[in-house]
Image: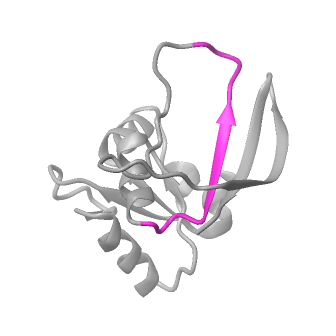
Amino acid sequence: MEHAKTVGNFIVGRRTFEGMRGSGGGGPFADVDIVVVSKSVKNIPGIKIVESPQEALNYLHEKGHQTALIAGGADLHNAFIGQGVVDELIFNVAPVLEGKGLNLLLNTEHYQYKDVELLDFKSLGSGVVQLHYTISH
């Protein structure tokens, strides 16, 4: 929420948005431009729906935003990363072990490798650590 308020927007996938809305989300984001990327949903009152990462970026650029925040699952992140439009990554690492985590891929057809540089890290409390990286292009 802090990052979304700072940049004034965020791009989210349909499933993440529905989970956010289901838990009473949206209220704290009243002054934030929300863009949902979905090929199946066509209309959510008060929310911009687009079908592709580029449409989302174009919309936010037209609204005057120079930075976009992506919040969602691996599919959404991989769509943006695959287009080479991601400059920074922020991970919140929680003290939980699970069978499947967020799997970010640069390219699913060819092996690719990109260096990342740690910009910042901080404790968010309850054992959660936030890591902030920049991606080499």
User: What colouring does the structure picture have?
Assistant: one colour
Can you say which quadrant of the picture contains the C terminus? bottom right
In the image shown, does 78 or 37 lie closer to the viewer? 78
Q: Is residue 46 above or below residue 76?
A: below
Q: Residue at x 27, y 64 (%)?
A: 52
**Closer to the camera, 111 or 44?**
111
Q: How many marks?
A: 0
Residue at horizontal 48 percent and vertical 13 percent from the top:
99
Q: Residue at x 18, y 51 (%)?
A: 41
Residue positioned most to the front: 111
Q: Establish if 54 lies above or below 66.
A: above
Instruction: Tell me where residue 35 appears, x and y as whole percent.
Output: 38, 62
Image: magenta residue range = 84-97
Position of 31 relative to 2 (above/below): below
Which residue is depicted at the point 38% across and 52% down? 107
Residue 73 sits inside the magenta stretch: no
123 or 25: nearer the viewer: 123
Whole-percent x and y of residue 129?
77, 34
Q: Is 66 left or right of 120, judged from the image as shown?
A: left
Residue 7, position in %: x, y?
Answer: 62, 68
Q: Nearer the viewer, residue 70 or 89?
A: 89
Quick check: 52 left or right of 32?
left
**49 with respect to 100 (left or right):** left
State left or right for residue 96 relative to residue 20.
right
Q: Position of residue 18 (x, y in %)?
A: 34, 39
